[in-house]
Amino acid sequence: MAIAIAIGYITHTFILSTCATLPNYIDRTPLESESERASIRDTMLQLFTKHPSVCRHMTRMSTEAFAKLVQILKGRGLLRDSRRSSVEEQVAKFLFVVGHNIRNRTNGGIFRRSPETNSRHFHNVLEAIIMLEDIFLIQPDGSSVPPEIQNSHRFSPYFKDCVGAIDGTHFRVKASSDSVNRYRGRKNFPTQNVLASCSFDLKFTYVLPGWEGSASDSRIIKDALRRFYLVDAGFMLNSGLIAPYRGVRYHLKEYSKRAPENAHELFNLRHSSLRNAIERAFGVLKKRFPIVASGTEPHFGVDSQTDVILACCILHNYLMGIDPDEDLIAEVDAEILVRRRHRSRLLVNNPVECGQGKRIRDNIAKEMWNDYIKSRGHGS
């Protein structure tokens, strides 16, 4: 009887259209025993993890990706079945929270667990995901040229020593009254500034969360690794951080009607083409896991939210390797294109430039421009 009730309430269409109201609906259903609750939990889990479209909507990944994630967590001894809760259930509940930014009460209505149990399972899975950092959050060793550069005549050999892109983004946090001013920066609400680097296949290679929203990217970079990365004009130029030329057109759409006219413009065009990987990576992360988006105040405190951000970055990398979701990436790309149409065309001048970094950039720009002139009839 309980299974029939669950199936009746959780049809594919119902989940997709009324997910937010589902818990209250189930809460009003009379349940007479733990066996009925267990039957409903089993049915929910089957619906979440066996039906492809339901699984993707509820856990933000395919059934195959979900099964493999559970296998990894079990295989490394990070999670175990308890007497009343399988690893599959614990992981499904965690993914439902981070994929829909819901509270424990909502999970409780669906999985028929107490808020205390749901909270314990959430933090157990959160800790387990973070323990996968050594597998899925790996810094490049610089021993090989990224294929996105190696296989493109526009980027190779000019950016052969470039290993990725770096940028910072703000994530909303729930700060205490005595610390809220430290987290209130450019936004009207408290945030933490998260610095990250990514490779050109949109995988994060370094994540530094936990900085107050008032901290600038330049201040944070002093605590980060120093390699050859592409950065935007907000960072200082040095031998490990190659920024675009200031006072020069930059974003891609600016060259749609007029070709680059000098070495600096050509450099900025191709710099932008490569560096947008970090903007795309952040966009996919926030769209896949709304719990880290800055639209609403998080349900967790700063420390827990910092861990959640790191865990979501690890899950993002895992999924980019096994289940990238091209439709989601295309959606992010379209939104970035719209935003760029409203941005300033000129980068303001910044006198803080390292001589060595400037020489690296000038040499790349000169070589790139010479080759561009020679083959101008074949495009840029």
Image (cartoon, rainbow, N blue to C red):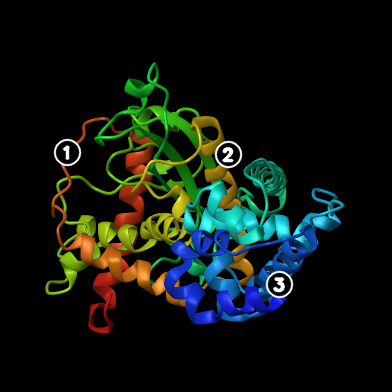
Alpha-carbon span between mark 3 and mark 2: 37 Å
**Residue bearing mark 3:** 2
Instruction: Say left or right for 326 vs 104.
Output: left
**Residue bearing mark 1:** 349
Q: Amino acid at mark 2?
A: Asp
Q: Amino acid at mark 3?
A: Ala
The answer to whether the residue labelled 1 contacts the one labelled 3, judged by CB atoms less than 8 Å apart, is: no
Task: Provide the secondary structure element on which disc 2 rests.
Answer: helix
**Residue bearing mark 2:** 307
Q: Residue at x 51, y 42 (%)?
A: 227
Q: Residue at x 80, y 50 (%)?
A: 79
Closer to viewer: mark 2 or mark 1: 2
Label 3: how many Cα within 10 Å (few below 14, some 14–19, many 20+): some
Alpha-carbon span between mark 1 and mark 3: 67 Å
Front residue (pair 318, 78): 78
Q: Residue at x 39, y 74 (%)?
A: 330
The answer to whether the residue labelled 3 contacts the one labelled 2, judged by CB atoms less than 8 Å apart, is: no
Instruction: Say left or right for 92 vs 181.
Output: right
Alpha-carbon span between mark 2 and mark 1: 37 Å
Quarter of the picture containing the N terminus is: bottom right
Coordinates of residue 173 in the picture (x, y in percent): 42, 36
Label located before the other in sequence (2 or 1): 2
Closer to viewer: mark 1 or mark 3: 3
Q: Is 23 drawn above or below residue 245 in the view shown?
A: below
Q: Is 100 drawn above or below residue 214 in the view shown?
A: below
Label 1: how many Cα within 10 Å (few below 14, some 14–19, many 20+): few
Q: Is residue 226 visible?
A: no
Q: Amino acid at mark 1?
A: Asn
Task: Provide the secondary structure element on which disc 1 rests.
Answer: loop
Q: Is residue 111 visible?
A: yes
Front residue (pair 184, 13): 13
